[in-house]
Image (cartoon, grey):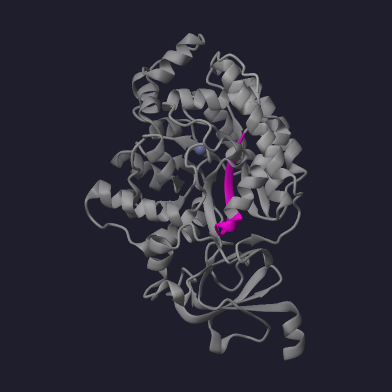
Amino acid sequence: VSELSARQYRTRYHARWVLPMTTPPIADGTVVVEGDRIVYAGPRADAPPGRDEELGDSILLPGLVNAHTHLDLTVLRGFLEGLPFFLWIRTLTAVRRDVLTYDDCLDSARLGVLEGLRAGITTFADTSPSPAAFDAMRELHVRGIAYREVFGPDPAQCGASMDELRRTIRSMEAYRTPLVHIGVSPHAPYSVSDDLFAATAAYARERKLPLATHVAESAEESDLVARGDGAFAAFLLGRGIDVAPRARSPIALLERQGVLAPGTLLIHCVRVDGEDIGRIAAHDCGVAHCPASNAKLGHGVAPLAALRAAGVHVGLGSDSMASNNRMDLLDEGRLAVLAQRIHEQRDLLDAATAVELATLGGARAIGMGGIIGSLEPGKQADLAAFAAPAELGPLYDPHDALIWSLGGAGATLVVVAGRELVRDRVHVGGGLDGQVPQRVARAAARLQSWKRARDGATPTAQ
Ligand SMILES: [Zn+2]
C-alpha cells in the first residue's frame, strides 16, 4: 500500500512508553490501529505507515478491564454509608424494589460507564438483575459482559427463578452486539439455593453463556454455608426457609453444584483457604479481586498472592459505587498491592503485577484473554493512555508511575475497538443526552425521601 492510502485507514499512536503486557515496556513506542484491530506494537522506528497521533509524554497500555461492576448502582454512591453488611444488602435490595425504575438504573449506568471511561476502563464485567447496564454499555460503545443476576434462596422458588432467567436472557439476546455479551449470575450463596446454583450452571453450559457469582465475601456468608447460623441464617429462617450446614466452605458448595468451570468468574474470594484455592485453580475459574470494596465493607483481604501463585487468573474489580465509592483501576491496583503488603508483611507483589491485574489478568479472568488485555497484532484495538508530563518530575519506570502516582489522574486517550471515546479526559464518543446528571439528581432526591419516610422522620416543610 502507498503511504498516502495507509494514512487513510491506519492510525499510529506514538507514546513515550508503550506497555504491550506480553513483552517488556517499549520506550518511544508506537501502536498502529487498522479498523477495530491492532496491527503493530513496537518501536516507533519500525512502525508501518499511517496517520500520526502524538501522545507525547504518555504511557500507552491496553484498555483497563474492570472485572466487577454494578454500573446501575452509581446513583447509590454515598447513600448506604455506615450500614453493617447484612443491613447494607437488605437496604440495597429494598431500594431496587421500591424506588429505582429501569430509567433511573439506565441513567445511573450511563454515568458509571462514563466514569470508567474517563479512568481508562474499556471493558466492564457487570452483574445486575436489570438490563440497564447492558443497554448503557451498548449505547456508549464500550466492551463488556452483562451477567444477568438471578435470585432465590428458597429451593421452592427454583423453577420460577429459572423461568424468569430464561425469559430475560431471550429478550436480551436479540440485542447482543460484537462488543457487549450476555452472561448469567446466580447472585451469592446467601441469596441462591443449592438447586438454583445447579440449575443456573447447567443452563449456562447448555447455552454457552459465561457465569459470574459473588462468593466467599463475608463472615456471615461462611457462617451460613458451613454452620447454618449467623445473620443470613436468621433472616432465611424468618422467611420460613430451612437452613442447615451446606458445605465446608462457599467454594466447596459451588463445586458440588457444578458452578466451578473454566470461564466461571468468582467475585471476591476473600474467605478461601488453601483447599479452596486448589479447587478454583483446578477448575480454571477466574477471580475478580475487589480490595476497596472488601476493605470498606469490613470483609478483609483476599489472598491475592496465593491465588496468583496457584495460577488463577485474577482481575481487579471496583464493585459498585455503593461500596467503593470510586471507579479507578490504577487506584484499585495500588490498594491491591498495599493491602497484600500490609496483610503479609512482605513485598509479594509489585506495580507491574498490579498493571497486569488491571489489563491482561482481568481479560483472562472474564474469558476474553484471546481478544483483549494486551497490545499485540490481531487483538482488538482497546487502548488507554495516561499522561506523565515532565512537569511532574522524572519517570523512571512506567509501571511504578501508573500504580504509585497516576491513580485518579484520568486517561488522556481511550479507544475501544478502534473508536476514540475519550480525549484529554473528556468523553468524545457521543451517544449521550446531556440531561443524564439532572435526572440522576432527581432519582437521588426520591431516594432521600424514601429514606426519610422509612426512618419515620417527620417530613419537613421546605
Ligand atoms: Zn458485587
Q: Is residue 382 left or right of residue 191?
A: right
Residue 81 seen in the current view: yes
The image quarter in which residue 372 lies = bottom right
Give the answer, above or below, for where 75 lies relative to 224. below
Residue found 50% across the figure and 53% down from its top = 328
**Residue in the foreground of this view, choosing between 141 and 446:** 446
Rendered position, 12 above or below 106: below
Q: Nearer the viewer, residue 219 or 252?
A: 219
Q: Residue placed at 58% from the left, 32% from the top?
A: 200
Please provide percent x and percent y for residue 425: 60, 62
75 magenta-colored: no
Q: Is residue 301 left or right of residue 265?
A: left
Q: Is residue 311 visible?
A: no
- In the image, the segment drawn in magenta is 117-128
The secondary structure making up most of the magenta span is strand
Residue drawn at the location 54% of the way across and 52% of the way down:
367
Q: Residue furthest front?
A: 462
Q: Quadrant of the C terminus?
A: top right
Residue under the point 54% across and 78% down: 56
Magenta stretch: includes residue 126: yes
- Coordinates of residue 205 in the picture (x, y in percent): 59, 40
The quadrant of the rendering that contains the N terminus is: bottom right
Q: Is residue 460 above or below residue 81?
A: above
Residue at the left extreme of this rendering: 345
Q: Position of residue 12 (x, y in %)?
A: 63, 79
Residue 143 position in % (x across, y down):
64, 54
